[in-house]
Each structure stands twice: as structure tokens, then as C-alpha cells.
């Protein structure tokens, strides 16, 4: 199966660009971040101490995560309960960054992510797709942008969901803090795969970035 491994820092536009490209290429978009967010969401609502790896590991034993594709849209479930829209809050995002450093969390999702790539042609985005999850993907892309621009993009997203609750300065700083954690974590840190193509979207629209990714995919497929 043809697969695209799409890595990069928070706010670079990975999910938006990947969704647009997947539709045009007839591929499934796999949002690995949503998987981690689903785990974090469940732990927050069950009041698990996410600062303790042993408690997180125990909590994982009780979580049954499912992915359902509805007209190529990835929907996240905890058991039979859909949580797709509930996992997109700043609080869940912060908790996700905390638990993502734990080996037990990554191990729980690794098989699920690889199985999806065996079943479908996928564009899979995350932090360690090209380096750890799909190291043999025929196309690896590192999607990035200036931290201030990523912060501005994330701020506009938050304003749509929670108007007036966040400032631009706070959002940019949160992006920089997230970068620091993701790049310096011990397990599967954010880094560019040696054979990945860098796509800097600082001065690109989402459509332009998607066009570039589609062209890369078509060239990698040989057509």
C-alpha cells in the first residue's frame, strides 16, 4: 500500500493540508494526533494523574479506542461513544503533549497505526511517522512553518471555538513550549526523517501546500 508519512511541529497545518491532499489523491487521512487526544481526553475525565506514568499505564488497560471512517472522515470512539468533537480543546492538547512521552501510550497506538497503513492507502500525520511508525513509507514530508505564523494560525482556530478566551501572545508561547517538549522528549522525539522532503508553509496558503503535497505524491507514485 502507498503511504505518505507527514511529520512536523504543532500548528504547521498538517491535518488541514493532509485532508485536502487525501481527498484529491483518493487516500485515507490518518490523524494520529486525534488518537493521542482521545486517550488524553478519557484520562482527564476520569481524573487520572497524567503526570505519573505508572497511573497512565494502568488507565490504558481500560481504554478501548476505535477509528471509524465515514466518507473518508476519521471519527474517534471510546468504545461505542463518539468523541471526535470533544477532543479539540486546549486542555486536551496540553494533556496529550504530557502523555505522548510515555512508552506505554505509544506502544498502545503503534499497532493500530501500522494496521491502518496495511489496510488503506494513507496520509498519516504526526511527530514520528517517518522516523518510527512508517519508516518505509515511499514518501516522507516534514511540514513546518515559522513559530509565530503557526501561533497565529492556531489562535484563529481557537477564536472560532472559544472567542475571547485566548490571546495571540499566549498562543504563540504555547506553540513554542510545545515544540520544546516534542523535540526534546526521550521517546520518539519530533525530528525530520533523513529522507524526508521539507515543505515550509510559512508563506503558503493551505491550498498551495496541498497542491505541493499532491505533486510530490504523484511523482512518488510515478504518475
Image: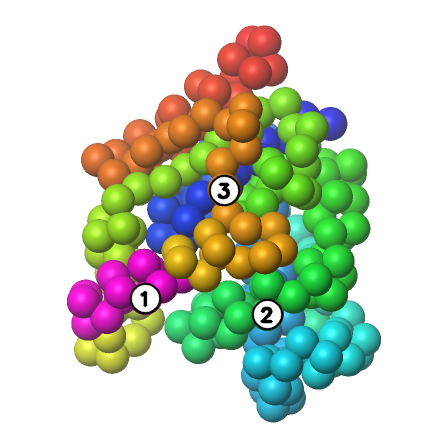
Q: Main secondary structure of the magenta part?
A: helix
The count of marks equals 3
Identify the residue shown where x is 61% and y is 86%.
49
Give how far apart the Cα atoms at labels 2 and 3 are: 18 Å
Say which of 6 and 173 sits in front. 173
Task: Look at mark 1 in the image and give the residue it sits on.
Answer: 174
Say which of 107 and 221 sits in front. 107
Give above or below for 46 relative to 107.
below
Q: In what element is the residue under mark 2?
A: helix
Task: Look at mark 2 in the image and give the residue it sits on.
Answer: 99
Ranked by sequence position, the earlier of labels 1 and 3 is: 1
Task: Look at mark 3 in the image and give the residue it sits on.
Answer: 191
Q: Position of residue 68 (x, y in %)?
A: 69, 56
Rate crowding at label 1 as few (under 14), some (14 to 19) or many (20 or more) other CA atoms within 10 Å: some
Give above or below for 54 relative to 138.
below
The residue mark sitting in front, 2 or 3, is 3
Q: Position of residue 79 (x, y in %)?
A: 75, 73
Amino acid at each position: 500500500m502507498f503511504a505518505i508519512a507527514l511529520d512536523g511541529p504543532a500548528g504547521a497545518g498538517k491535518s488541514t493540508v493532509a485532508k485536502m491532499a487525501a481527498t484529491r489523491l483518493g487516500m485515507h487521512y490518518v490523524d494520529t494526533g486525534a488518537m493521542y487526544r482521545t486517550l488524553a481526553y478519557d484520562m482527564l475525565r476520569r481524573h487520572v494523574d497524567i503526570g505519573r506514568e505508572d497511573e497512565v499505564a494502568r488507565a490504558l488497560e481500560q481504554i478501548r479506542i476505535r477509528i471509524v471512517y465515514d466518507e473518508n472522515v476519521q471519527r474517534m470512539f471510546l468504545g461505542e461513544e463518539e468523541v471526535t468533537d470533544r477532543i479539540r480543546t486546549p486542555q486536551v492538547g496540553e494533556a496529550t503533549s504530557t502523555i505522548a512521552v510515555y512508552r506505554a501510550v505509544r506502544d498502545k497506538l503503534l499497532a493500530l497505526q501500522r494496521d491502518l497503513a496495511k489496510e488503506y492507502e494513507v496520509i498519516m500525520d504526526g511527530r514520528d511517522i517517518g522516523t518510527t511508525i512508517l519508516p518505509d513509507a515511499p514518501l516522507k514530508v516534514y511540514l513546518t512553518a515559522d513559530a509565530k505564523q503557526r501561533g497565529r494560525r492556531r489562535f484563529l482556530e481557537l477564536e472560532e471555538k472559544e472567542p475571547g478566551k485566548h490571546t495571540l501572545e499566549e498562543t504563540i508561547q504555547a506553540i513554542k513550549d510545545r515544540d520544546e517538549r516534542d523535540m526534546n522528549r526521550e521517546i520518539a522525539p519530533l525530528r525530520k526523517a533523513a529522507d524526508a522532503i521539507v515543505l515550509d508553509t510559512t508563506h503558503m496558503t493551505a491550498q498551495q501546500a496541498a497542491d505541493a503535497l499532491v505533486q510530490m505524491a504523484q511523482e512518488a507514485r510515478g504518475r
